[in-house]
Amino acid sequence: MKLEFRKISHLVACSLFLFLGVASYAQASNSNVSPEYASLAPSKISAIERSKSKEDENDKLINNVKVFYNPISEQISVTFKLAKVNNITIKVMDALGNEVLSLHNGSLDAGMQNLSFETQQKLAEGFYFVRVSGGSETIVKRISIKL
């Protein structure tokens, strides 16, 4: 009898928690929506959220960094969008973080940047990282070198 009473009390407690959870969810879904979003459909709300994420992306100095062709043999091409004029450094680092090759260190104008660098046989075959730095931002992309 004692065992059945425990099972029944456990079942009642679980049912109570489930009921309270459903009731609070129903109350939340019927609550007032802020006036900013009151007349918007869900698709419009997601469009607002997307525009906010684009604003966050616009706050970044360096966007859309791409390093190609991967694997690299003789030439490294780096493309990225720069939000404003800034001093940019582009370096090739080994797996331990040691600088192997400095590709660029200087000021670049705002806009899309398409830069190509000859490796001049200075990199042995293996995996490396291209580090693009400007201001307080650093973007790192992994590359492989095939000779």
Image (cartoon, rainbow, N blue to C red):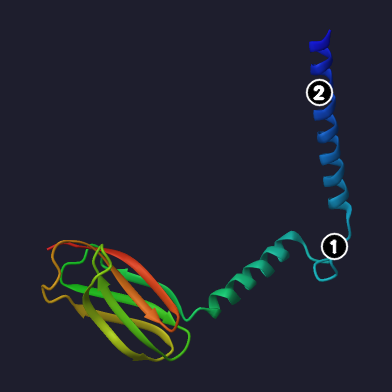
Q: Looking at the image, tell me whether mark 1 or mark 2 is earlier in sequence order.
A: 2
Given residues 28 and 4, the one toward you in this image is 4
Q: Position of residue 16 (x, y in %)?
A: 85, 32
Q: Quadrant of residue 62?
A: bottom left
The 10 Å Cα crowd at callout 2, few under 14, some 14 to 19, many 20 or more, is few
Given the current orientation, which residue lies at the most extreme front position? Answer: 2
Q: Quadrant of residue 119?
A: bottom left
Q: Name the side, left or right, on which 24 lies relative to 131.
A: right
Q: Amino acid at mark 1?
A: Val
Residue drawn at x 69%, y 69% is 48
| Circle number at residue 18 | none
Residue drawn at x 81%, y 17% is 6
Q: Name the side, left or right, on which 52 lies relative to 77.
A: right
Given residues 133 and 44, the one toward you in this image is 133
Given the current orientation, which residue lies at the most extreme top position? Answer: 1
Task: Identify the secondary structure beneath mark 1.
Answer: loop
Q: Amino acid at mark 2?
A: Leu
The 10 Å Cα crowd at callout 1, few under 14, some 14 to 19, many 20 or more, is few
Q: Position of residue 67 (x, y in %)?
A: 31, 70
Disc 1 designates what residue? 33
Q: Position of residue 124 (x, y in %)?
A: 13, 65
Q: Quadrant of residue 78?
A: bottom left
Given residues 36 and 95, the one toward you in this image is 95
Q: Name the side, left or right, on which 108 lies relative to 27.
A: left
Residue drawn at x 48%, y 85% is 83
Across the whole image, how many numbered discs are drawn on residues? 2
Task: Identify the secondary structure beneath mark 2.
Answer: helix
Disc 2 designates what residue? 11
